[in-house]
Amino acid sequence: MAKFVVAIDGGAGSGKSTTAKAVAKRLKFFYLDTGAMYRAATLKYLRCGGSTDNIDTALVREIIKHTVINLRQEGSKILVFLDNKDVTLEIRTTPVNNFVSPISALPEIREWMVQKQREVAEGKNVICEGRDIGTVVFPDAQVKIYMQADLKIRAQRRQKELDEKNIEADFNKVVENLKFRDKYDSNRVHSPLKKAEDAIILDTTDITIEQEVDFVEKIVRERLKEIPKIQNT
Ligand code: DC
């Protein structure tokens, strides 16, 4: 079991990664980016020549058996490894963006990932971000946050992020991709994106990164004070 879990869920580009990363750094928690894991699995499927018209479920089952996905923290960076090769940048490219939602909707893929996510968190204080963290992966998380923001703001932030990584993307396509993924991720049958009943909503449309990080940090610190045994380990 994980020691203390902060679950951050929300739509694409709502600020989850930025916030989770910064809060993890301030509190020395382990940062677990579950979206990166679904992205790595999608990259593997595409590299194996998997069809994007109809999902090749036999190939998906083979991939699950023969694929190793790891996240490594190196200084302030989180690196993503697929079969021991660094794919940190490649998982953010357009083909992966366009196909990650259908792949992550598959129950086989979700079962594989959720098991892995719980294994990674074992014995740690973690900040875990994704779509189903507070509802499915860690329903007993000590803190649950649900992040949201206006679509235009989210698209602007996403494009800035891609620019910084030198990944080319047309603004209208970024908007369309966010819209498509949110709709797909919220309407899928298995573990759809939804706010856990006991999650606190954090709308980041009109606030700065500093403010959103402070907000989450404050909630976590307050909760930690209620559980002194964990705070001191
Ligand atoms: O957080 P992200 O944009 O990197 O996530 C990429 C995709 O992965 C997202 O569109 C849906 C899927 N995902 C998921 O289904 N469940 C999670 N816990 C995290 C991500």
Image (cartoon, grey):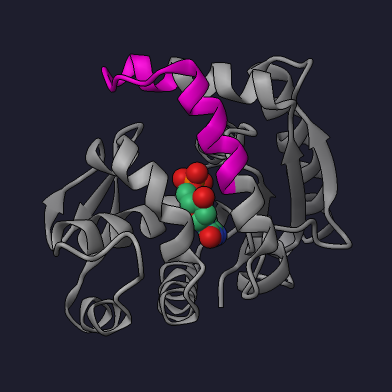
Judge whether residue 32 can be spotted in this image.
no
Report x, y in % for residue 150.
Answer: 74, 26
**Residue 10 appears left or right of 66:** right
Who is closer to the viewer here, 57 or 129?
57
**Residue found farthest to the front:** 53
Judge whether residue 115 can be spotted in this image.
yes
Report x, y in % for residue 142.
Answer: 75, 61
**Which residue does the image show at 30% across and 36% down from the upper left?**
93
Residue 226: quarter of image: bottom right
Q: Main secondary structure of the magenta part?
A: helix
Q: Give, as a single range, the part of the protein colored magenta.
A: 161-181
Q: Quadrant of the N terminus?
A: bottom right
Residue 167 drawn in magenta: yes
Report x, y in % for residue 129.
Answer: 57, 51
**Which residue does the image show at 56% across and 16% down from the upper left?**
156
Q: Quadrant of the C terminus?
A: bottom right
Relative to 32, is 48 above or below? below
